[in-house]
Image (cartoon, grey):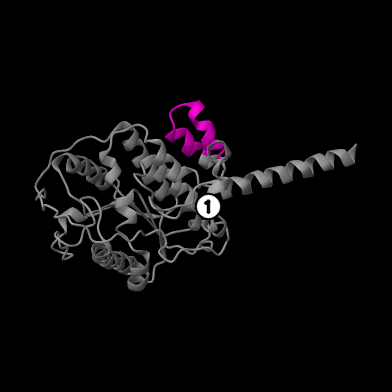
């Protein structure tokens, strides 16, 4: 009887391991719409000083390689397309299982979006590659409205079982523990044919309240950072601004001030960082690599000032 129990337990363990491995192989790996999530797990434990979160406005703006050169701080851009604040929150919790960073940097574009739930592609890009545990389950429950729709997030094989004929070299290599991309989550974008209008909103004081869900998760993020003795920096990367969006950002600035959280809006710093509105953008929402370099250099200087003040 004892031998049978042992055999059943061994079989169950082997089945579980096989299920996990097959699920990892079949899930889509492409990072065309965000950070390389799987590669984040391969970063050496407790090696990151700074982690970026947020939407494409983060992963197309902040260059970890530049920040390392300028400050000596190791960073990773753990952002995904249209990453809502609730997913940013669970990504932060995820990162704390493997890293002890000094800083969390949250790009705040998505505070200006009132949707209670994002579309499936956004959720898949962020959630499917997370390691399965309670944190992932909570991320799914917060991101997907109905129980029926959540099932294929709990069990990726339901969604990706037919990908066998699409598998390539990347699907295998991305699972290797030494597979770390040198860009560390940053996405290089080429120069676009756009001209950004510099709308002066420095004296625009209208405030539009964040949606209740956004406000709830922004407060959760603030508490999480404080509870873990992490400096939280809220940043708006350069993009075509509008009064509607700025009204939300004004609310974020209020919340930051009330909680003694650092806040930086690059839409007000074009001249300071010598940003060329005719040549430094990929489109109206994203910098090209030249623009990203300028912002990353300025942000590195900002970080060095924070570090120096800590040491005084």
- Is residue 233 something one can see in this rendering? no
Q: Residues within 10 Å of mark 1 (few under 14, many from 20)?
A: few
149 displayed left or right of 237? right
Name above or below for residue 46 compared with residue 208. below
Residue displayed at 52% across by 57% down: 170
Name above or below for residue 61 compared with residue 69. above
Q: Which residue is mark 1?
A: 97
Residue displayed at 26% across by 44% down: 258
Residue 141 part of the magenta segment: yes
Which span of residues is magenta-colored? 137-156
**Could you tell me which quadrant the C terminus lies in?**
bottom left
288 displayed left or right of 27? left
**Could you tell me which quadrant the N terminus lies in?**
top right
Element under disc 1: loop
Q: Which residue of the protein is positioned furthest toward the front in this rendering?
A: 165
Name above or below for residue 275 compared with residue 154. below
- Frontmost residue, 146 versus 67: 146
* SS assignment for the magenta stretch, majority: helix
**Residue 171 in picture, x, y percent from top left:** 54, 54
């Amino acid at each position: 009887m004892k031998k049978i129990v042992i055999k059943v337990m061994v079989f169950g363990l082997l089945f579980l391991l096989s299920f996990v491995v097959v699920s990892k192989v079949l899930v889509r790996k492409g990072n065309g719409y965000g950070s390389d999530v799987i590669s984040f797990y391969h970063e050496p434990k407790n090696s990151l000083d700074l982690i970026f979160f947020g939407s494409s406005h983060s992963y197309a703006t902040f260059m970890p390689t530049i920040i390392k050169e300028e400050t000596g701080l190791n960073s990773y851009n753990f952002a995904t397309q249209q990453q809502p604040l609730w997913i940013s929150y669970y990504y932060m919790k995820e990162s704390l299982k493997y890293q002890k960073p000094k800083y969390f940097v949250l790009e705040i574009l998505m505070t200006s979006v009132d949707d209670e739930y994002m579309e499936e592609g956004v959720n898949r890009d962020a959630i499917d590659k997370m390691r399965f545990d309670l944190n992932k389950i909570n991320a799914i429950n917060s991101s997907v409205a109905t129980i029926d729709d959540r099932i294929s997030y709990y069990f990726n094989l339901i969604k990706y079982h037919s990908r066998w004929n699409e598998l390539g070299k990347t699907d295998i290599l991305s699972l290797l523990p030494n597979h770390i991309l040198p860009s560390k989550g940053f996405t290089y974008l080429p120069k676009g044919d756009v001209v950004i209008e510099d709308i002066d909103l420095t004296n625009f004081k209208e405030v539009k309240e964040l949606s209740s869900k956004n406000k709830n998760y922004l407060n959760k993020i603030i508490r999480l950072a404080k509870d873990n003795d992490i400096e939280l920096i809220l940043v708006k990367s350069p993009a075509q601004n509008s009064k509607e969006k700025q009204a939300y950002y004004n609310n974020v600035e209020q919340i930051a001030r009330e909680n003694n959280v650092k806040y930086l809006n690059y839409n007000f710093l074009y001249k300071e960082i010598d940003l060329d509105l005719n040549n430094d953008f990929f489109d109206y929402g994203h910098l090209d690599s030249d623009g990203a370099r300028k912002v990353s250099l300025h942000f590195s200087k900002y970080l060095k000032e924070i570090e120096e003040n800590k040491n005084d």
